[in-house]
Amino acid sequence: MRNRSDHSTEDAPELIIEAGRTEALYFQDLWRYRELFYFLAWRDILVRYKQTAVGVAWALIRPFLTMVVFTIVFGRLANLPTEGNAPYPVLVFAAMLPWQFFASALTECSNSLINNANLISKVYFPRLVVPTSAVIVSFVDFLISGIILLGLMAGYNAIPSWRIVTLPLFIAIAFAAAMGAGLWLAALNVQYRDFRYVVPFLVQFGLYISPVGFSSSIVPDRWRLFYSLNPMVGVIDGFRWAIIGGEVNFYWLGFSLSLLLVGVLLITGILYFRHMERTFADII
């Protein structure tokens, strides 16, 4: 006859500790914790616009004012050419959308792990959730800012061509570029806090070397491929090609190079982030 202790021992669940199991199931855990993407992103959206007078309208005001300044400086004073038959404000804002999304994602991603230090040091979950949710927040601003582009196109009677159906492809490329660069900066900022000062400089510098306020067609042909080493050149040119109707010159070789660089940036960003992830809780 078995005693009570033997019976309870047989019925107890068996705990198996297997080395490397967490690593092997990492991407399955991302799916299991999918609701965390929503909660972190929604929290950041609420915090960003909390106690502001105009709230979410800031997502409209900032790109709109930047578009006005660029139109005056490059379109009126410098008298730079537009593309196709697009009004200059439409040309600028078609580039402002992906650039603002990319710049905002870099800034938010670089600080995402530091801002969630208490959560990271106490609770297990795939750390990739944190910077990804920061990119999602920037993507929400991107969608809101799209209202301005619709208004501009309606006001100038700028009707897009069939190429508008390819816009989701270029949005996906912009998202990949933001994720890849954001993962690099998020991981580096944990180890080297100097990057909190480097990121604003990178964003400002990148604005000037990207074709946001002007068309990339003004770059001399012998420099076009070199200029495309900036991954955002291909993304911005793709947005303009998809949005602006009429004759728009699209530099396919440069776009292919930018697309390749975005892929490398995303893959290496994920690999480096995963490599550093195990040390985040100790360093942060």
Image: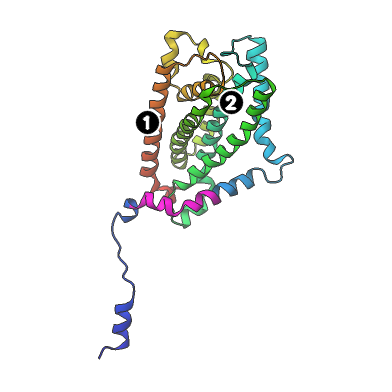
Quadrant placement of the N terminus? bottom left
Report the number of numbered marks.
2
Task: Check disc 2 and report its element: helix, strand or loop.
Answer: helix
Give me the residue at 30% from left, 83% from top.
Answer: 7
Residue at numbered disc 1 = 264
In the image, residue 21 lies in the stretch drawn in magenta: no
28 within the magenta span: yes
Lower position in the chain sequence, tag 2 or tag 1? 2
Q: Marks 2 and 1, Cα distance to the nearest angstrom?
A: 24 Å
Q: Could you tell me residue 242's position as x and y percent?
A: 52, 23
Main SS, magenta region, reads helix
x and y, in percent, of residue 72 in the image? 68, 16
Q: Quadrant of residue 263?
A: top left
Place of residue 168 in the rendered image (x, y in percent of width and height, measured from the top left): 50, 32
Residue at which label 2 appears: 96
| Nearer to the camera, 43 or 197 | 43
Disc 2 marks a residue whose amino acid type is Met
Report the residue at 53% width, 19% height from top: 211
Residue situated in front as seen by the camera: 39 or 108: 39
Residue 4 in which image quadrant? bottom left
Which residues, given as a range, are shown in magenta?
25-39
Number of residues whose C-alpha sits closer than 10 Å to that of mark 2, classed few (under 14), some (14–19) or many (20 or more): many
Kind of residue sitting beneath label 1: Val
